[in-house]
């Protein structure tokens, strides 16, 4: 490789080691990470005739990646300036914007705010409050997440009046306040109009570029999936309640799964999922109902109030553990600084009044335990995150969710036009979460890809390793892939190898930001130069060539004075050979007016010392699939470079890396 930010190894090194920034190469995996040793990696690369590149992990960068990182909350009544709200950070001695640390914006809103009357959808009207709110997010480059609330007991008219006017059944918890109607979710009129809403919403937001996830249940108080009303209290038997729960959950999750086919769907994993009560012992059917939604509808997990011990108990922790690294988990913090759920009266008794940082630490710890992908800057709680717990904000950005990078790549730096390249790449996830490539809405759309870039950085050739799967990259478990490209059918010249995780549903563009320090352009991490050479299909009779081994060194005839070696970093006259037609489809190699001889295997080393051509000086010229050539002597064995560590011999029964040579 020829770029100035790559260092050549010593003259007799087995291969070139490379790094992507001038501070030096990464010598080993971070402490605690398993993986093969450097020596083993170098040996494997040498066998393939490749060089090793070891990108350097970036442990501090903030990465905005899909379904990963902090979530900023939107407010129904927010003005456009809301998104630029600043918070003072003592550790920085400066103000910062929460949006600069967020990867998505969560809007928990009412059905009425989105659809106040039949056929009217406020998000399509940029002059409406909702239109301004959503547009404010979009113009700042963040994807949106939704929860749609229909219950009217605490917040008033969350379901629009036209639904009840059409005859939908409801329960009124306070007859004196007729705006607090809560619809029965099994009512056919309610379902008809709600289905229309979700179908219309999906027309505009079933797009992963603009939508992060959908909190796709929304029933019950605050849409949190508990305290759901199916009938007036005392009307249904226990069996009828359980039947209503199961049927309703199947209906609403089916609706979202049918309409939002490209967007992650999440559900609150409450121990009383869909139940008419909020408090009490675990319902026997909760696990079954949630598991059905996950397995049958492709749902992921979200839980409210991670640090509020009355909400987040042992059942919730155990359920999260069951799905750890199988489905992504999103954490919502507790409403603890203001309102009725003051943290110092939490039943856990672990929080000091006047110290919201106690709760922030607990949320962080519970999130690490559950390996969550996303945490919340909840409205009313954001200030305390920045003013009392900013180090935790930074830690989650660098420790939580997923942080992916290739810690080792082996690839050729020369290749013949039209040939294929055999590569290997190893990936490490330094975050405690995982990249949920396996959820049905993503359907394994993220794959590792290699590109050959021209001098302007344009992709001239793209190779996708379809065997790669980021959802399997878990912390402390590096995974290596061996990959053979398709034909490198490019005009001979110098190109740059680059690597990325691409989105196959978005034109194979890079879709995951990598946690690396290096030359990254448009999502592609440059690895170094590769020389695409003219294809050699027949022996170049009469031409002078140089033979470069898999160790990147040149073979020398040694002027016939000693056995040949393949250890020269540059090629001069002793390293130049003329290809001579030896008859019968065979060739001879001539240097300094002498011929290379196999010496029938030459256990003491082949020489370039014969003045005439006999059988030992004849070789079969073999072009390998990767465009490199091999030379087979009259003993049926192949010449080996011996990796430059000893004299060259003609005694190998098969071709591997040491038995192949590039032409220069």
Image (cartoon, grey):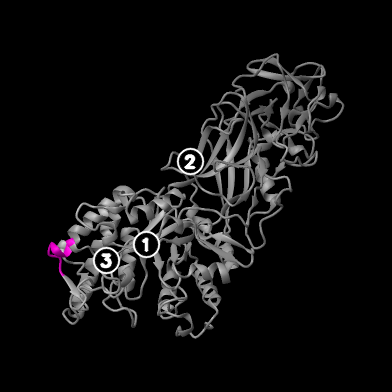
Q: Quadrant of residue 43?
A: top right
Q: Which mark is residue 330?
A: none
Q: Is residue 211 magenta?
A: no
> Circle 3: is it few (<14), some (14-19), or many (20+) Cα within 10 Å?
many
Mark 1 touches mark 3? (CB < 8 Å): no
Q: Residue at x 43, y 58 (%)?
A: 105
Q: Which stretch did the figure color magenta?
A: 162-169
Q: Is residue 386 left or right of residue 649?
A: left
- Return the x and y of residue 495 as percentages of the image width and height: 61, 31
Which quadrant is home to the N terminus?
Answer: top right
Q: Is residue 388 left or right of residue 272?
A: right
State which mark lies toward you, 3 or 2. Answer: 3
Q: Which mark is residue 509?
A: 2
Q: Which mark is residue 77?
A: 1
> Circle 1: is it few (<14), some (14-19), or many (20+) Cα within 10 Å?
few
Mark 1 touches mark 2? (CB < 8 Å): no
Q: Earlier in the sequence, mark 1 or mark 2?
A: 1
Q: Earlier in the sequence, mark 1 or mark 3?
A: 1
Q: Report how far apart the C-alphas of labels 3 and 2 lie in the structure.
A: 40 Å
Q: Residue furthest right?
A: 561
Q: Which residue is mark 3?
A: 158
- Return the x and y of residue 36 as percentages of the image width and height: 65, 54
- Return the x and y of residue 533 as percentages of the image width and height: 63, 25
> Circle 2: is it few (<14), some (14-19), or many (20+) Cα within 10 Å?
some
Q: Nearer the viewer, residue 240 or 345?
A: 345
Regarding residue 214, the answer to whether it shows in the image is no
State which mark lies toward you, 1 or 2. Answer: 1
């Amino acid at each position: 490789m020829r770029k100035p930010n790559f260092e050549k190894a010593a003259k007799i090194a087995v291969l070139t080691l490379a790094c992507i920034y001038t501070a030096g190469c990464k010598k080993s995996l971070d402490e605690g990470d398993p993986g093969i040793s450097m020596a083993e990696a170098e040996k494997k690369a040498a066998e393939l005739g490749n060089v090793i590149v070891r990108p350097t992990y970036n442990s501090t960068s903030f990465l905005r990646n899909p379904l990963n990182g902090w979530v900023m909350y939107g407010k129904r009544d927010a003005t456009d300036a809301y998104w630029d709200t600043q918070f003072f950070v003592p550790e920085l001695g400066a103000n910062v914007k929460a949006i600069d640390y967020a990867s998505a914006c969560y809007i928990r809103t009412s059905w009425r705010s989105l659809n106040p009357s039949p056929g009217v959808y406020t998000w399509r009207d940029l002059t409406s409050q909702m239109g301004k709110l959503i547009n404010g997010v979009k113009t700042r480059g963040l994807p949106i997440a939704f929860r749609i609330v229909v219950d009217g007991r605490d917040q008033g008219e969350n379901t629009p009046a036209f639904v009840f006017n059409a005859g939908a059944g409801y329960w009124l918890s306070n007859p004196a306040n007729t705006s607090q109607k809560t619809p029965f979710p099994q009512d056919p009129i309610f379902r008809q109009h709600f289905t229309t809403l979700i179908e219309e919403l999906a027309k505009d937001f079933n797009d992963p570029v603009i939508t992060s996830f959908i909190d796709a249940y929304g029933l019950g108080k605050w849409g949190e999936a508990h305290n759901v009303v199916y009938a007036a209290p005392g009307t249904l038997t226990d069996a009828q309640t359980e039947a209503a729960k199961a049927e309703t959950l199947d209906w609403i999750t089916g609706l979202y799964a049918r309409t939002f086919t490209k967007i992650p769907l999440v559900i609150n994993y409450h121990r009383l999922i869909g139940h008419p009560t909020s408090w009490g012992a675990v319902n026997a059917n909760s696990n079954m109902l949630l598991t059905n939604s996950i397995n049958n509808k492709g749902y992921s997990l979200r839980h409210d109030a991670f640090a509020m011990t009355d909400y987040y108990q042992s059942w919730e922790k155990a359920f999260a553990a069951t799905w750890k690294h199988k489905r992504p988990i999103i954490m919502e913090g507790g409403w603890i600084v203001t309102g009725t759920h003051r943290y110092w009266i939490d039943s856990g008794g672990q929080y000091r009044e006047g110290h919201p940082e106690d709760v922030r630490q607990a949320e962080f710890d519970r999130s690490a335990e559950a390996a969550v992908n996303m945490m919340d800057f909840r409205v009313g709680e954001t200030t305390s995150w920045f003013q009392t717990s900013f180090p935790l904000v930074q830690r989650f950005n660098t420790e939580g969710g997923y942080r992916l990078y290739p810690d080792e790549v082996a690839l050729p730096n020369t290749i013949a036009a039209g040939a294929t390249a055999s590569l290997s790449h190893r990936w490490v996830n330094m975050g405690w979460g995982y990249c949920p490539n396996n959820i049905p809405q993503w359907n394994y759309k993220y794959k590792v890809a290699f590109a050959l870039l021209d001098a302007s950085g344009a992709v001239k050739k793209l190779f996708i390793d379809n065997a790669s799967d980021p959802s399997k990259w878990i912390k402390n478990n590096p995974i290596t892939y061996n990959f053979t490209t398709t034909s490198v059918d490019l005009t001979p010249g110098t190109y740059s190898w680059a690597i990325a995780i691409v989105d196959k549903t978005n034109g194979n563009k890079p879709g995951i930001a990598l946690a690396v320090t290096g030359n990254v352009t448009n999502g592609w991490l440059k690895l170094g130069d590769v020389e695409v050479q003219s294809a050699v299909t027949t022996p170049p009779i009469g031409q002078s060539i140089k033979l470069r081994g898999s160790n990147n060194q040149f073979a020398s005839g040694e002027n016939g004075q000693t056995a040949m070696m393949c250890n020269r970093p540059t090629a001069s006259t002793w390293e130049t050979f003329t290809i001579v037609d030896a008859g019968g489809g065979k060739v001879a190699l001539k240097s300094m007016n002498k011929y290379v001889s196999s010496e029938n295997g030459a256990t003491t080393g082949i020489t370039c010392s014969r003045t005439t051509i006999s059988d030992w000086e004849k070789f079969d010229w073999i072009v390998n699939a990767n465009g490199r050539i091999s030379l087979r002597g009259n003993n049926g064995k192949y010449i080996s470079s011996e990796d430059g560590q000893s004299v060259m011999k003609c005694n190998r029964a098969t071709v591997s890396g040491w038995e192949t040579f590039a032409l220069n």
